[in-house]
Image (spheres, rainbow, N blue to C red):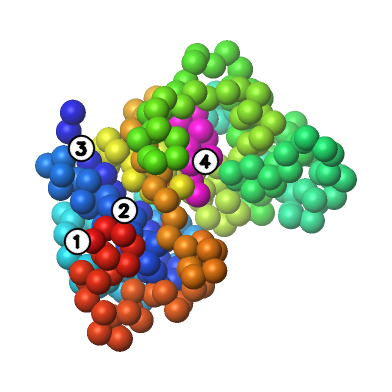
């Protein structure tokens, strides 16, 4: 089987050691398999994406020794494609517009109950307030959600192959888990034309990605992606969720941890080889 993977950063801050690890690991795996490494810029959140961060991403990745074919896919160029995918889910009767704000959702969720999950891979599990609203009512301030109960009704057994260090092997999707611990995920965010989940499955399919290499933090979201792939008739790649690079106190690195920015190490004279060693790829 051919091997095509990708690195898909959002240009909303500097690349840090965690991103470097993810990108280099994917690049190494593609090379070992004599496959392809692609780059994708995940910039649907135009309120946070900045051209200077995108330029810095290209520059840092080049400096690390990574190469990829042009043109690079950019999500902001692909809104009509996401619209088509959404329309397909809407035509199946699986979507609804939601006007709830964070405060409404918290109020409707009520007091936490023991054993009932409050948060899933898409954030707070939606209590269903707007579930009966028809798509025809969609207004500019609404988000679009997937009705998880309907989306998983009559589902054939779905699974994906995971090759990462924490969950090796076949992972089966579970309908109750999707309804109770994931819930009605957002397919289109307010003023964004799409969401991470919808875009990522459409893009991985359109780029012909056979192997997704990304952080362990996205393992739980993968069941959403596999479900959407099924509903949209898209192939399911093999997944590899790698360990996360943590800071000295054991906390996972985030965009705001500028102290670990690749650009900062570069300015201090650290070499790409030393970066590889720092993340354990040496
Ligand atoms: N843009 C996502 C991130 O930076 C990548 C998600 C993915 O690789 O699927 O976390």
Residue that appears at 39% across and 28% down: 169
Q: Residues within 10 Å of mark 1 (few under 14, many from 20)?
A: some
The kind of secondary structure the magenta stretch mainly shows is: helix
Q: Is mark 4 within 8 Å of ligand 1?
A: yes
In this rendering, is residue 111 above or below 17?
A: above
Which residue is label 3 attached to?
Answer: 3
Upstream in the sequence, badge 4 or badge 3?
3
- Of 37 and 71, nearer the camera is 37
Percent x, y for residue 20? 32, 63
> Can you say which quadrant of the picture contains the N terminus?
top left
Residue at 49%, 29% in the rendered image? 227
Question: What residue is rendered at 34% in x and 45% in y?
Answer: 213
For label 2, the residue is: 7
Give the alpha-carbon distance from disc 2 to disc 3, as whole Å.
Answer: 14 Å
Q: Is mark 3 within 8 Å of ligand 1?
A: no
Q: Position of residue 233 (x, y in %)?
A: 39, 25
> Circle 1 is placed at which residue position?
66
Residues tagged 1 and 2 counted as in contact (Cβ below 8 A): yes
Mark-to-mark CA distance, 1 and 3: 17 Å
- Left or right side of 83 for 58: left
Q: Is residue 134 left or right of residue 239?
A: right
Is ligand 1 within 8 Å of the beta carbon of the residue shown at mark 2?
yes
In the rendered image, residue 19, in percent from the top left (x then y), is placed at: 37, 61
Q: Secondary structure at mark 1?
A: loop
């Amino acid at each position: 089987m051919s091997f095509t993977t990708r690195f898909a950063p959002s240009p909303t801050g500097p690349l840090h050691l965690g991103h470097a690890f993810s990108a280099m690991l994917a690049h190494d795996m593609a090379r070992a398999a004599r496959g392809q490494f692609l780059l994708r810029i995940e910039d649907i959140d135009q309120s946070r994406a900045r051209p200077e961060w995108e330029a810095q991403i290209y520059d840092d990745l080049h400096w690390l020794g990574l190469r990829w074919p042009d043109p690079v896919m950019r999500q902001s160029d692909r809104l009509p494609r996401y619209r088509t995918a959404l329309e397909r889910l809407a035509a199946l009767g699986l979507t609804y517009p939601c006007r709830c704000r964070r405060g409404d959702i918290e109020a409707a969720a009520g007091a936490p109950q023991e054993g009932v999950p409050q948060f899933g891979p898409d954030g707070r599990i939606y209590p269903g307030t707007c579930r009966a609203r028809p798509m025809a009512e969609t207004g500019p301030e609404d988000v679009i959600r997937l009705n998880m109960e309907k989306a998983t009704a009559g589902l054939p057994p779905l699974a994906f192959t995971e090759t990462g260090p924490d969950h090796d092997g076949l992972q089966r999707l579970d309908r109750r888990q999707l309804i109770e611990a994931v819930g009605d995920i957002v397919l289109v965010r307010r003023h964004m034309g799409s969401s991470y989940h919808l875009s990522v499955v459409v893009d991985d399919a359109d780029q012909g990605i056979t192997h997704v290499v990304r952080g362990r933090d996205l393992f739980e979201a993968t069941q959403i992606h596999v479900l959407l792939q099924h509903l949209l008739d898209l192939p399911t790649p093999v997944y590899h969720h790698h360990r996360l690079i943590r800071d000295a106190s054991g906390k996972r690195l985030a965009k705001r941890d500028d102290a670990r920015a690749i650009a900062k190490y570069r300015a201090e004279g650290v070499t790409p080889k030393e970066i590889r060693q720092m993340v354990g790829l040496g």
